[in-house]
Amino acid sequence: MTVPLDTLAAPARRGSARPLLGRLGGLARQPVLMVSWIIVLVVIGWAVAPRLFTSYSPYEGDSAASFAPPSVEHWFGTDRLGRDLFARTVYGAHTTLTATLLAVLIAFGIGTVAGLIAGFSGGIVDTAVMRLVDVFLAIPSLLLAMVVVSVLGYSTQNIALAVGISSIASFARVMRAEVLAVVTQDYVRAAYGLGRGRLGVMLRHVVPNSLSSVVALAALEVGTAVLAVASLGFLGYGAPPPQPEWGLLVAEGRDYVATHPWAAIMPGLALALVVVAAHRISTSYRKEHRR
Amino acid sequence: MLRYLALKAGRALFVVWAAFTLTFVLLFVLPANPVDLLFDPAELNTVTPEVRAQVAESYGFNKPVVLQYLARLGHALTGDFGNSVQSGRSVTATILDVLPSTLVLASGALVLALLVAFAIALVATSTRRPWVRNLVEALPSGAVSVPVFLSGILMLQIFSFQLGWFPAFGDRGVKSLVLPVITLAIPVAGPIAQLLVRSFATEFRSGYVTTSWAKGATRSGIIVRDVFRNAGLPALTIAGITFGNLIAGSVITETVFARQGIGRMTQAAINTLDVPLVQGVVVLVAASFALINLIVDLIYPLLDPRLRAALAVGSPRAA
Amino acid sequence: MTDVPEREEDPLLRIAGLAIDYRTGRRRWTPAVRGVDLHVDPGEFVSLVGESGSGKSTLVQGALGLLPPSARIRAGSIAYSGVDVTGWSDQRMARVRGNYVGFIPQDPNTSLNPVKKIGQQVIESVRFNAPDARNAAQHREAALESLRTAGLKDAERVFHQYPHELSGGMKQRALIAIALAGRPRIVVADEPTSALDVTVQKVILDHLMRLREELGIGILLITHDLGVALDRSDRILVMQDGRIVEEGPVRQVLENTTHDYTRRLLDAAPARQAGRLEPTSGPRARPTDTSPVLRARALTRTYQLRGGRGRRRQLRALDGVDLVVRKGTTHAIVGESGAGKSTLASILVQFTAADSGTVHIGDRELTGLGRRELREIRRDLQFVFQNPFTSLDPRFTVGKLVAEPLQAFKLATGKQERTARVVELLGAVALDESHLHRLPAELSGGQRQRVAIARALAPNPGILVLDEAVSALDVSVQAQILQLLVDLQAELGLSYVFVTHDLGVVRLIADDVTVMKGGVVVETGPVEQVLRSPRHEYTRELLEAVPGAGINGAGTSGGERVGAAIAHQA
């Protein structure tokens, strides 16, 4: 037998398991991406251990220092009751991020399974699931979430549930589209030919290959869900006032925006930064996994 | 062609019906005691059982759920969603009152958003400087990341309080419309621009563009004559998403700028648990969404000769 | 009034010392073209031959000033009729393109704007290059004229049609019309027929030859097909790894091949082979037991076309097809696109169900079996796909890919046993343990197809169905895979069903051949008989369209067509 000539070997695309160090090195060459990761990690830190980041209490204020502008002492300034706004933002991360995480998990879990079943079974099951998805897509998610919250009662957990339910449809749609694309691939047909049953094909080939764009969507959805949670908080459907929640912080500051703009703007900017960072990370993930 | 039409129209009708049913279940069946929802929560304790029974009677809550559903559905078909609990006026009339104001805001924002989105895509495609492209391409994801309430407040702070160019609140005159329209246009433009930037880039790399280069066409000529139409079409496919963004955005924009409109009314209706009004709004929104998608489905083939041919002759499909 | 003044002594196109790099990192550049010299004289037909990755397309893009932003010209010059256009801006190049040099792209299916009528697209080409402002009617007339010149007899009708309403061959003619509409002095054609069927390819190439004579233009043809180049050109250049390794008039290249690579290419070309390939282990024993292992009878498959206005149309993909595969032999199924050969292959392994008709493996009927029984039979009946880039799960390593059937059929239970078997299988296709942990993306096309074959061999099948299994590969790689298949057949006594569009390959590997057209078998029989004395007109047409008549070169007359050449050797 001749030695394989294959002189025109295709250049290797991306490595099988790129070592962690290599990945970090790649990160260093993308400063924007690195900053995005730092922002997200810091905010997660706020949510997990707020005490490490601020010595002020989010509830106790110094009424003498009412509406102090941002300074070295109070980075974000203080509110009407003299509470440190940075501390309230740091502590608020817990409420907002927990709700976001819960929302994305609900949407990802239910949406992905529904999309997988619809795409893989086809026929009447597919039609039924997709028509249901149509209905959920027809009601803007903020509106749907508002209705759900109004039925369930006002609280951050219910906001999470509502936001989660209202984004199931988009996950289901993306997953189904992915599954449909993967199912027609030669390697899936090949797997049947190689003796795999339907379940084996689904678990070994279809799910792993269709999941990457849904994961990218989940990353994107984290940003969107933070916005939705905060928006509902801003409209007053979330935690009751003394609690620090990002949307609520902005809403509280909004009444004084003419005279003390930082009270609304500083927490708002923190929120916007997190969302921008989440988007940036999601985009780079999608670029890396584009087929 | 007729088949296609019937199929699409059937789907649209289904969506509206399902939205009605869904809200019925959510608002009238799930709550433990729907009668309670009809009263202002603060006054709930003072309501006597007799009054409750009377209200339940008049709203039909004492009848079986199926009968209630059919009765409401029957009325809804004639455009009657009952009366608002708060004002006592008919839901339809209440919505029609505030609809024009929202329509003006939304259509202004949509036009602005489209202009901005196309401008971004054109600049990103036509520039030869990578840094300009990178900068311009970063704009859309920024636009979808900034919460509407923050951009609204920033607008107010800068252009109203600091510079005094525009009034802060109210809905009188064109001037009061400027800030809300810009605020609402930002999140709406974001996704459209993202899509357009992508499809402009894809089309600009496609085979027929190479053919045009080889014909001797110039860069601007290619963008205008070849790329624009092919790349612009996909924007129609996210018309539904755009509509959703407009609705969600107007809820917040109207709240921030204290404007009258569907959004603010919906928020008030949900705050006061004005169940019939909420259902009316949801069904209206779902119907508009379905209608928009139906229109897109119908005009898309007119704009794309390939699709038109597929509809006229039939597309190969494994039986 | 062209911007390029004419000087008779200069060649139409002269490329000198051209080097082009691609950006592969922040400050890293990888060369794609490394110092190429090339010229095309008036009325000359020059072919540039190379396999994928040789840099031939980059060279053309460079010549037309159509390089992507990630590429740069490092050195060298490009001159049209003595005017150096290197580094000209898009604005200036726009007046050279179309006007002076016409371009025929590779894929007619993506190279026309889908939302514009053909006429409009040709008119644009006329308008951009009209020396003086003419009115719309004149533009229209010129466009129609150009369509007619390109060989579209029904120019008036085509003028008002959209691209999707035309066949591949007609689209390519429309593109030729666009290239000619600017009245260029030279036409550059980048693989203009690679996406087309052989019979269509022949017509298009014949037409290009005629245009050269009638219009006196120069033609630069880029192709991967040495046969096409040798058949058609005055002069050929062979490109490898960004360099021209061989250059000269056709006869000279054939008779005095100077470069090793050219010789390898010539040897790899199917038409060069004397007849059926022999196993490397020695001449093969004629299979003695030739009882049928696979029989298909009266297979029919219809696709419903979803019609408008309540009307339902049907597409007969297969219409009463019979097939018999003898044990230990190769049965080739050959045909052009739309012949139904892939549908047939797909039905043989039951990826697709037939509407009617039967398939027997040995004495077991395959059609209408349940999922479980089918799975049992598939151990004996394996499939190799056309495109090794899509038939391997991108997330599986080579080891996992080959082990999958062992696992699924529960053939090797222990982990060690399985790994041992996988290595053994890789050995059979000339790969080794070092490939075990690689991903498909890290392999070349040929290596991937070897993995696909190893995987198909894993359950010890008796029959392999190969659907265009070598079509996506370069000729030199193709030759190796074909040799591998022949060796495996001799060693393991396999029977092959070999689906292909390439008659040249049929001769190398098949014992029997079935020719299909439009879902119907037009001719079937032993290879020697069908290729030497085809009974059906269509078979004859196919044979005549196969390029590479001149490839046996040395000695034989150049004008002889390959059909005859094949017949001589069979």
Image (tube, helix red, strand yellow):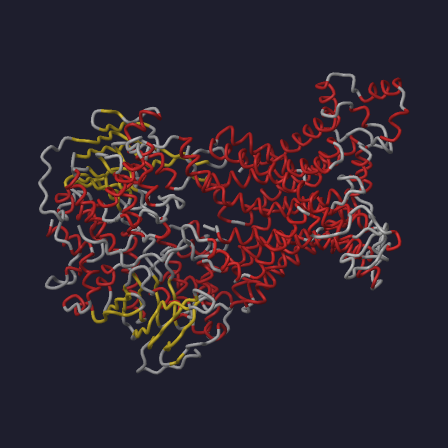
Apparent side of residue C65 relative to residue B102 in the rendered image (left or right) = left
- Pinpoint residue A68: horizontal percent, then vertical percent: 84, 58
Apparent side of residue A131 relative to residue C442 in the rendered image (left or right) = right
Asked whether the viewer can see residue B101, the reply is no
- Pinpoint residue C5: horizontal percent, then vertical percent: 40, 82
How many numbered dots are placed on residues in this image? 0
Instruction: Give the quadrant of the C terminus of chain B.
Output: top left
Going 54% across and 58% down the picture, which residue do you hit? B200
Q: Is residue B302 above or below residue B85?
A: below
Q: Foreground residue, B55 or B295? A: B55
Q: Is residue B97 above or below residue B275?
A: below
Q: Foreground residue, C332 or B2? A: C332
Q: Foreground residue, B100 or C58? A: C58
Locate residue C225: give its quadrant: bottom left
Going 12% across and 64% down the picture, which residue do you hit? C554
- Pinpoint residue C134: horizontal percent, then vertical percent: 50, 71
- Pinpoint residue B137: horizontal percent, then vertical percent: 59, 60
Asked whether the viewer can see residue B212, the reply is yes
Locate residue A134: give its quadrant: top right
Going 71% across and 28% down the picture, which residue do you hit? B26
